[in-house]
Image (cartoon, rainbow, N blue to C red):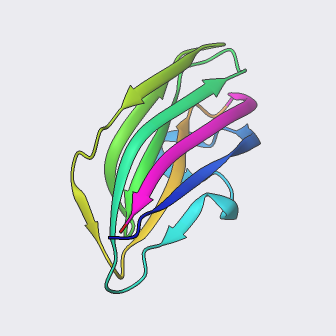
Amino acid sequence: MITKNLFLQGIYPFQGVGMEKPVPIHSELSHYVPDGVINQTLYFRGGNSGSELVTVVLMRNGVPMRYFPIGAKGDVHVPLRVVEDIEGGTVIELYLVAPEAASGHLVIDLGMVEH
């Protein structure tokens, strides 16, 4: 079986718009799982340069799948170790939930494998 490693990663500025509505961080943090392929998330690492707690939300087809809170001027590493299969035809995206006044930069690294 051939596997392919994938990463949604980068450093992105953010401006909070409120805690009620997740918003896309950046269009680069989106991945379409091809038909006939299984995607599995392996880990999430994130950093927050801002002075308020923020939460990165892993969305599957527009529905929240996992929440990753990142403390003020903090970081997080969550080993997911193939928590569940994500079927082909699915869109995976990373969104942000942050207080209205919050701003800063996010460091994002979501590691995945497809087979």
Residue 34 x/y as whole percent:
43, 82
Mainly helix, strand or loop, the magenta region?
strand
Q: Position of residue 29 (x, y in %)?
A: 61, 57
Q: Nearer the viewer, residue 41 or 64?
A: 41
Residue 108 colored magenta?
yes
Could you tell me which residue is drawn at 32 percent across and 37 percent down? 80
Q: Is residue 61 left or right of residue 8?
A: left
Query: In the image, which residues are magenta?
Result: 101-114
110 over 86 or under it: above or below: above
Residue at x 56% of width, y 34% of height: 98
Q: Is residue 23 above or below residue 114?
A: above
Q: Quadrant of residue 40?
A: bottom left
* Residue 59 percent location from the top left of the image: 40, 57
The quadrant holding residue 54 is top right
Left/right placement of residue 49 relative to residue 54 reads right
Task: Say which quadrant the C terminus sits in.
Answer: bottom left
Provide residue 85's location: percent of width, then percent of height.
Answer: 23, 61
Name the residue at the front extreme.
Answer: 1
Q: Is residue 78 above or below residue 21?
A: above
**Which residue sits at x=57%, y=30%?**
46
Q: Is residue 103 magenta?
A: yes
Quarter of the image with the N terminus is bottom left
In the rendered picture of this protein, how many numbered marks are placed on residues? 0
